[in-house]
Amino acid sequence: MRVYDTIAEFRSSLDEARAAGRRVGLVPTMGFLHEGHASLMRAAAADNDEVAATIFVNPLQFAAGEDLESYPRDLARDLTICESAGVTHLLTPSAAEMYPRPIATTVSVAGVSAPMEGASRPHFFDGVATVVAKLFNICGPCRAYFGEKDYQQLLVVRRMAADLDFPVEVVGCPIVREPDGLAMSSRNVYLGPAERQAATVLSRALEAGSAAIDAGEVDPLAVEAVLSAAIAAEPLAELDYAAVVDPETLDPPERITGPVRLLVAARVGPARLIDNRSASPG
Ligand code: AMP
């Protein structure tokens, strides 16, 4: 595995690889890696000849008062995880390398960015879309792997790549969970023991919502009430949103007659956690 601090060296290595006919898979991350990230890297390694990964905690996607400064970091451990998951080229740029001047150009994806995470964190998806656009341009033609853990982000990135004709195929990968159902997240490290236990309420709420649909519930508001009630039953969790939406457009359906996506966000102690799952009637 080669590790690069500079965009220019990372880019020219990947250009060279492609010129030799090798296909490139890209896995953008913010580091403090876990098995969820490693699963994306292994998927990229299975489908491609080179695996490019990036570790960059992107200031553009954090609002004032969010956890930019305290976001967990452990580069030594990340290097080991990347190496064993098959990464061949790792870019670990500084903020000055990525943003050598105040950025004047912002990528904004209307529609899919608006609800849920977009409503709760208005700055967030412009920050994500802008840094991912930069990373796609830095990497060049590739397949890029994103987790369904951040389901709305996956749709935002996919739409951006399509609308702006990036030579990038966006690949969605399944959520990796802890044995008790908690979706793996770098931010789980913020949880104390009681909060860690309480955090399983997100996946349990989603299971309850899915079970209601299995049992014939077709009213999305009734399913949202099931999600909210499950989270309200956990005293350490504070609900942000619970939503039942179309899996492609993220619009709320009038009735549940086909596949839907269930999404929840809640604060558990110091951590803001998100989770989601698919559900279909009958
Ligand atoms: P992050 O480092 O949190 O920005 O995440 C980098 C990538 O890893 C994103 O595409 C995430 O969706 C993905 N990811 C994070 N956690 C998981 C997980 N538990 N399962 C699958 N993918 C994940």
Image (cartoon, rainbow, N blue to C red):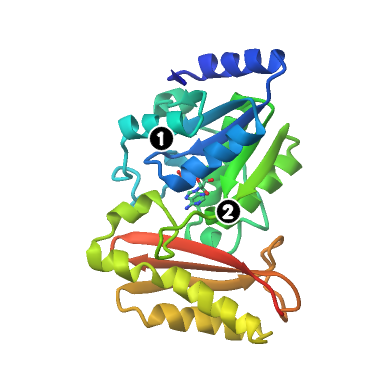
Give the image location of residue 44, x and y in percent: 60, 36
Specify whether tag 2 is near ligand 1 (CB below 8 Å): yes
Q: Is residue 176 visible?
A: yes
Binning the other alpha carbons within 10 Å of mark 1 as few (below 14), some (14 to 19) or many (20 upward) gives: some
Disc 2 to disc 1: CB gap under 8 Å: no
In which quadrant of the rendered image does the C terminus lie?
Answer: bottom right
Nearer to the camera, 37 or 169: 37
Tag 1 or tag 2, which sits nearer the N-term? 1
Amino acid carrying label 1: it is Ile
Which residue is the site of mark 1? Answer: 81
Q: Determine whether, in the image, residue 129 is placed left or right of residue 57.
A: right
The image shows residue 233, relative to residue 204, as above or below, that is below
Nearer to the camera, 267 or 21: 21
Give the image location of residue 152, x and y in percent: 59, 56
Q: Determine whether, in the image, residue 134 is placed left or right of residue 33.
A: right
Q: Is residue 101 visible?
A: no
Q: Residue at x 52, y 23 (%)?
A: 88
Q: Secondary structure at mark 2?
A: loop
Query: What's the CA distance linking mark 2 and mark 1?
Result: 19 Å
Q: Secondary structure at mark 1?
A: helix
Amino acid carrying label 2: it is Pro
For residue 174, which numbered disc appears in the image?
2
Which of the 4 quarters of the picture holds residue 5? top left
For residue 161, which numbered disc appears in the image?
none
Q: Determine whether, in the image, residue 193 is placed left or right of residue 184.
A: left
Q: Residue at x 70, y 13 (%)?
A: 19
Binning the other alpha carbons within 10 Å of mark 2 as few (below 14), some (14 to 19) or many (20 upward) gives: some
Q: Residue at x 41, y 68 (%)?
A: 266
Q: Determine whether, in the image, residue 70 is placed left or right of residue 276.
A: left
